[in-house]
Amino acid sequence: LPPTDQLDRVVIVLMAPRNPLNIGAAARAMANFGFSHLTVVAPYEPHWREAQSAVGAEALLQNARRTGSLAEAVADCTLVLGTGTLEHRKPEQPVLLLPELASHLRGHRAPGRRVALVFGPEKHGLTREDLSYCHHLLVIPTAPQQPSMNLGQAVAVCLYELATRLAVPEHEIPSEPATLNQPPASAADLHRLAGVVEETMQAAGYSPAAMRAANRHDLDLLLRRLTLNAPDATRLLGLFRRILWRLRH
Amino acid sequence: LPPTDQLDRVVIVLMAPRNPLNIGAAARAMANFGFSHLTVVAPYEPHWREAQSAVGAEALLQNARRTGSLAEAVADCTLVLGTGTLEHRKPEQPVLLLPELASHLRGHRAPGRRVALVFGPEKHGLTREDLSYCHHLLVIPTAPQQPSMNLGQAVAVCLYELATRLAVPEHEIPSEPATLNQPPASAADLHRLAGVVEETMQAAGYSPAAMRAANRHDLDLLLRRLTLNAPDATRLLGLFRRILWRLRH
């Protein structure tokens, strides 16, 4: 398995999980592959309490973070990957196949970069709204006859892939292009920026009430496609705040 | 996923599984990754009946084969891989790490070759005796703090690895060395040969009663290390039958 610091920058996010056995299984897989950061969003309370005693992962579950929303769960992350299948879905985010994940993350190793792997609820997976917080749709290649995986098994497969293929000898790591030397914007940066741009669109009369949710959704997708770095996001935030102030005065 | 014929030569063997949820989870993972041959050895009857209704894998479980022994389960296989960890164990078989599995199997694609992936019972995994039927100990790399995986998750991880990395473009497939052009001996061939060699050892006064089980165990390990091809096994069987006949007359 790779050095701990490589695994420690990955946080596993379970979105509204229902089945305590699945929560326990997800935590067990994290312990098996050396991951330690678990965040659970809006769990169903009695099941969450029951899950916290899962064999072999007690400490991990006791230390798990709980948040009320996905936005809060991924706020400090610079790369958010939502898991799902391609069945019944035309993806709105670029698709990343699981076997390509580790090489994709190698360009994302600098200090301060944090990656979230987000897993949806058992019944229907991540919603379109959940995915609007994600830079990529992470797809496990499965058979078309039975594409949908059990939650605990999906977590195990993703973490196995990461743990066994993230470690590379230092000399094989390509140096990042100079333009990428800036730290990427965090999910919180993007969320803040989207909020100010949205207000600006309204103040400018661009976004009628009926279109507001759809425009915000498109804006969320756009901001993640741009892969802004942190100074970009700060600059844009300043610009839109200025425009907004002007529009209002 | 690779073409069906590549996956169809792999049989998943569950050795004496106890928990019906785990049996169902193993079958579900098989369906997810396009595998269809399941053999269950000596299952606990009520749990096996309960497991047969696992969601998303009914057909696979209805068609599953049941055997009384591991020898019978792997009889038609030419490569038997027993899964396990390296904790508390000095392996008696060569170790194969899961990330190396697909490239190992690429040298084993010829028609008639069948591969068994054997998973032990939940509580203690495969015994030393079970492993004496195996050519390799297949190890999933896990964290030393929590090396032992849940059965359903271990199956999912192994099948994911195989399904996503077994398919290679035809031009990348190395042709097998001429010496390997013969089909390998099946597990049944090796079992038959071991039986005759064992009888011979006794008839020759080589193997006192107290040493019989230990000698047989060593013999089983040896025969799998040799990677005999089918004509080799037939030739050796003929030789030992002749020796045995001579010793007795």
Image: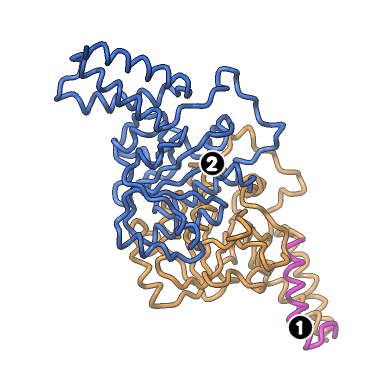
Chain colours: A orange, B blue
| Span highlighted in magenta in the image | A204-225
Q: Which residue is situated farthest in the front direction here? A: B249
Answer with left or right where residue A202 lies relative to residue B173: right
Callout 2: few (<14), some (14-19), or many (20+) C-alpha neighbours within 10 Å?
Answer: some
Callout 1: few (<14), some (14-19), or many (20+) C-alpha neighbours within 10 Å?
Answer: some
| Residue ID at (65%, 27%) | B174
Q: Position of residue B138 (x, y in %)?
A: 43, 38
Subunit ID for the residue under disc 2: B
Does A234 appear above or below B126?
Answer: below
Q: Where's the C terminus of chain B, which quadrant?
A: top left
Of the pair A72 and B157, the residue shown nearer to us: B157
Of the pair A244 and A153, the residue shown nearer to us: A153
Quadrant of the image occupied by residue A120: bottom right
- Which residue is labeled 1 in the image? A212
Instruction: Reply yes or no: does residue A16 show up in magenta.
Output: no
Amino acid at dot 1: Arg
Mark 2–mark 1 distance (CA, rounded to whole Å): 54 Å
Does B8 appear above or below A155?
Answer: above
Q: Position of residue A108 (x, y in %)?
A: 65, 49
Q: Which residue is situated farthest in the bottom direction here? A: A209
- Which residue is labeled 2 in the image? B9
Instruction: Reply yes or no: does residue A211 show up in magenta.
Output: yes
Q: Position of residue A81 (x, y in %)?
A: 62, 60
